């Protein structure tokens, strides 16, 4: 709780859009995994597959497939390094990584792979009746809740906090929630930088 909002973040929006996206996938058919559901905006080769074509439309609207698997939230992110369709995020076109902040004080996923130098737009949704924060940056700063570390605070139930961050250098980088007691309970995550 550094009290500072992230430099580029702070925007809150209703998370209902995510629910609509998940619901739409039900009718899309097929095993909608996190990677498959990400879609490829402008990508090639997917147009001939009707099932995936539907998901492409979802991605265009900012909600991508993934559906509900095992009862847990799996809002899909754009493909990451090493995954089919990966496009490195830039400052003008950040890559979207969606993270669920759960009522049992965890982030899902709790590990995010980024390419060195990438700009990522984190969209963090609070999935239960617990308000969270999302801080990302150098691991030491995140662990210490250092003032000035980019953070979006007060993400309440079914709201989404957005924070954009560029991963310059080798890291290590991390993310965490510093709502009282949450970090101590294990609400933290790791950024893996690949070159
Ligand atoms: Cu939290």
Image (cartoon, rainbow, N blue to C red):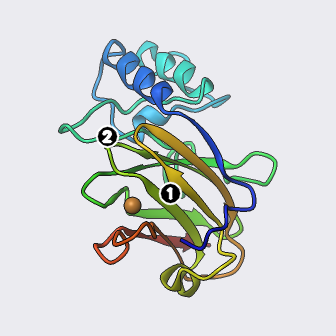
Q: Residue furthest right?
A: 92
Say if mark 1 contacts mark 2, CB within 8 Å: no
**Which of the two marks, 1 or 2, is nearer to us in this view?**
2
N-term mark: 1 or 2:
2
Q: Nearer the viewer, residue 96 or 31?
A: 96
What percent of the width, then of the height, locates residue 105? 30, 61
Residue that badge 2 annotates: 73
Answer yes or no: disc 2 within 8 Å of ligand 1: no
Count all numbered tags in the image, as a single digit: 2
Which residue corresponds to the image point at 58% horizontal and 32% vertical from the top-left?
40
Residue 78 visible: no
- Relative placement, left or right, of 106 versus 20 is left
Q: Secondary structure at mark 2?
A: loop
From this view, report whether residue 17 is shown above or below residue 118. Answer: above
What percent of the width, then of the height, locates residue 68? 27, 32
Residue 21 visible: yes
What percent of the width, then of the height, locates residue 192? 50, 72
From this view, report whether residue 136 is shown above or below residue 51. Answer: below
Q: Secondary structure at mark 1?
A: loop
From this view, report whether residue 51 is shown above or below residue 124. Answer: above
Residue that badge 1 annotates: 82
- The span from disc 1 to disc 2 (Cα, nearest Å) is 23 Å
Neighbourhood count class around disc 2 (C-alpha, 10 Å): few under 14, some 14–19, many 20 upward: many
Quadrant observed for ligand 1 in the rendered image: bottom left
Q: Quadrant of residue 57?
A: top right
Res. 3 mark: none
- Relative placement, left or right, of 168 versus 142 is right
Q: Nearer the viewer, residue 105 or 45?
A: 105
Q: Residue furthest left?
A: 70
Which quarter shows the C terminus? bottom right
Which residue corresponds to the image point at 49% horizontal and 49% vertical from the top-left?
155
């Amino acid at each position: 709780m550094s009290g500072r909002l992230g430099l580029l973040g702070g925007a809150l929006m209703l998370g209902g859009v995510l629910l609509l996206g998940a619901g739409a996938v039900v009718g899309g058919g097929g095993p909608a995994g996190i990677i498959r559901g990400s879609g490829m905006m402008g990508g090639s080769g997917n147009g001939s597959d009707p099932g995936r074509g539907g998901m492409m439309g979802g991605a265009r609207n900012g909600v991508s497939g993934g559906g509900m698997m095992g009862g847990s939230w799996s809002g899909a992110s754009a493909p990451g390094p090493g995954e089919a369709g990966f496009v490195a995020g830039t400052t003008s076109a950040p890559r979207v990584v969606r993270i669920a902040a759960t009522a049992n004080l965890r982030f899902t996923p709790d590990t995010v792979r980024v390419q060195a130098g990438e700009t990522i737009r984190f969209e963090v949704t609070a999935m239960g009746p617990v308000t969270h924060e999302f801080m990302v940056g150098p691991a030491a700063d995140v662990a210490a809740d250092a003032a000035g570390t980019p953070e979006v605070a007060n993400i309440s139930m079914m709201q989404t906090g957005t924070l954009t961050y560029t991963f310059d250098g080798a890291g290590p980088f991390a993310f965490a929630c510093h709502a009282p007691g949450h970090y101590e309970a294990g609400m933290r995550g790791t950024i893996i930088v690949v070159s």
